[in-house]
Amino acid sequence: MSERPLPLAGFRFLSAEQYGAGPYGTQFLAQLGAEVIKIEPPAKNGVGGGDTARHVGPHFLREGESVYFHAFNLNKKSLTLDLNSNEGNAIFRKLLAKSHAVANNLRGDLPQRMGLTYEALKDINPAIVCAHLSAYGRDNVRAKWPGYDYLMQAEAGFCALTGDPDGEPQRMGLSIVDFMAGTMMAVGLLAALVDAQRSGLGRDVDLDLLSAAVHQTSYPALWYMNEDTITQRTPRSAHPSATPSQMFRSADGWMFVMCQLPKFWTILTEKIGRVDLAADPRFARESDRLANRAVLSDLLDGIFSTQPTGHWQALLEGFVPIAPVYQLDQALDNPWLETTGMTDTVQHPDREDFRVLASPIRIDGKRLPNRAGPLLGQDSDDVLTELGYDDAGIADLRAAGIV
């Protein structure tokens, strides 16, 4: 990194978060230099406690310290605090006075009940930004509904758009709605923070999973809303209009070839030695290729299946958009990730050189630095000491189950 501080250095964000969506969004903030204090419920009688993500298997660094947790919580601090207790709430309010934003991804009815809204907190800190990420929003009849990524993929139409046309609807292989929604929450929080720095006034920022999912239906949504066109699943995960833009069989697997622009179709036919296809009236224009997609797919399958994927990639890369269809292990062992620095190692008390993904964001041309996610309550003593508690006072809080 350069000698300059990271963009969010000096900002403190509190986050009452759990599982995936909220922590994914605040991790970006932590990697960009903010002090993100993750507020987690303390263990009861030495059992449980913390973000539920700490307990998601199958892989653990220690009991209650899952590998899963570190996908969403790099660079953060952990404060155990019972926000439902009077003393815990008092500690939170002391900390809030020295913070810039508070985020949560609680069920929609809980932020108001727990006093995490701008209305509840503005008297303590008028510039505080309160970011809320829930399943369905905080201001409607679904506010009390629990909800998860897969449900949003189902209701927003993702499942109906994914998979083979003759097969069952399918969800995406990853919790993509969680990740999109968390990122959107971080964007909204930062926008409100910029305004709070100028005006001295914070506000509420709301994001819900279903709205995030629906927003990502994007151009097919506009096609339907304006032209009554219902986009359907396509064979080989093909683009709904550009052709050929789909998966093809090679001699040793699958690859994705994307002729999104007419020029790529021309270049493809030249590179594979079949300029006759470009002249064929069935494939001359994009509309012709779309109308005859099945015939064209069979023809190209016959060509591509004569050589392995590596052959076609070497021939076409840099000229026609092409990528191998990798299994996850192949994707993560791809040497390109080393070239671009998309993998990283961090030091963890239970595993030296713990491997993690690097941030996709670069600042001054460099990937952002990473630290391992915090142990449960790792920073509680430091935070409480800053607030004026001495060792005896902290011990009393811990004995009472407040921290």
Image: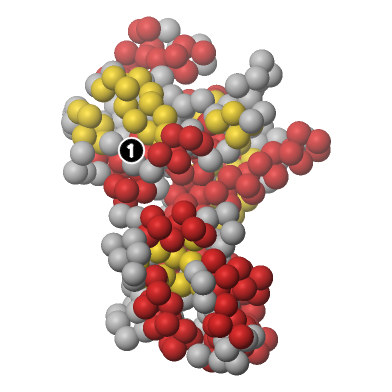
Near-viewer residue (254 or 308) = 308
Q: Residue at x 76, y 41 (%)?
A: 195
Q: Is residue 150 above or below residue 61?
A: below
Whether residue 84 appears in this view of the structure is no
Left or right of 10 on screen, residue 210: left
Q: Secondary structure at mark 1?
A: helix
Q: Residue 70, image x and y in percent? A: 36, 35
Left or right of 11 on screen, residue 70: left
Mark 1, Cα crowd under 10 Å, few <14 / some 14-19 / many 20+, is: many
Of all residues shown, which one is farthest toward the top? 391
* Residue for badge 1: 69
Of all residues shown, which one is farthest toward the right? 198
Q: Residue at x 34, y 71 (%)?
A: 305
Q: Residue 83, image x and y in percent? A: 41, 36
Q: Amino acid at mark 1?
A: Phe
Q: Residue at x 38, y 43 (%)?
A: 334
Q: Residue at x 44, y 34 (%)?
A: 338
Q: Is residue 132 above or below residue 300?
A: above
**Quarter occupied by the N terminus:** top right
**Quarter occupied by the C terminus:** top left
